[in-house]
Image (cartoon, rainbow, N blue to C red):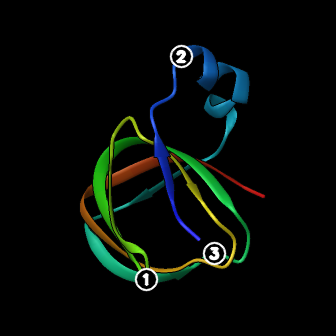
């Protein structure tokens, strides 16, 4: 189970309705997280390293990310994060 990180075009962002998704913000911090449902998000600002059993994933502003259901990880936010997110 792995994290998917990619860049989306403006058209792909619009087609997914991402700008209508809620926004989540978090300051520089480190915390454990478990995904009990899949999440898709678009990072608006900031940087984070997500540590998983499959390795470390560096995520930054402009990245579209898919987190699978069942993922256990540690978020290490190194620059305050703002993201659009969608569960399910």
Local SS, label 1: loop
Location of residue 19 (image quadrant): top right
- Can you tell which mark lies on residue 24? none
- Measured in 3D between alpha carbons, the distance from the residue under mark 3 to the one under mark 1, in whole angstroms, is 14 Å
Residue 11: quadrant of the picture: top right
* Marks 3 and 2 in Cβ contact (< 8 Å): no
Residue lying at the far top of the rendered structure: 11
Between the residue at mark 2 and the residue at mark 1, the CA separation in whole angstroms equals 32 Å
Q: Identify residue for label 2.
A: 10
Placement of 24 over or under 35, stated as above or below: above
Image coordinates for residue 31, horizontal then vertical, percent: 38, 82
Q: Which residue bears the numbered disc 1?
A: 53
Can you tell which quarter of the image residue 35 is in?
A: bottom right
Viewer-proximal residue among 59 and 22: 59
Mark 3 Cα-neighbour bin, 10 Å: few <14, some 14–19, many ≥20: some
Image quadrant where one finds the N terminus: bottom right
- Rendered residue at 66%/79% (across/down): 70
Q: Which residue is mark 3?
A: 35
Q: Secondary structure at mark 2?
A: helix
The residue shown at (43%, 75%) is 54
Q: In which quadrant is the C terminus drawn?
A: bottom right
From this view, report whether residue 25 is shown above or below residue 8: below
52, above or below 67, in the image: below
For the point 41% across and 40% down, the residue is: 63
Ranked by sequence position, the earlier of labels 2 and 1 is 2
Q: Position of residue 37 (x, y in %)?
A: 73, 69
Comparing labels 3 and 1, the label whose residue is closer to the camera: 1
Query: Is 16 positioned to the left or the right of 3 in the image?
Result: right
């Amino acid at each position: 189970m792995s994290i998917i990180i990619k860049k989306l075009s403006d058209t792909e962002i619009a087609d997914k309705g991402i700008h209508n998704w809620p926004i989540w913000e978090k300051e520089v911090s480190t915390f454990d997280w478990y995904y009990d449902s899949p999440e898709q998000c678009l990072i608006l600002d900031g940087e984070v390293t997500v540590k998983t059993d499959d390795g470390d994933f560096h995520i930054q502003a402009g990245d579209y990310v898919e987190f699978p259901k069942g993922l256990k990880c540690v978020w290490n936010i190194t620059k305050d994060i703002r993201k659009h997110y969608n569960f399910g």
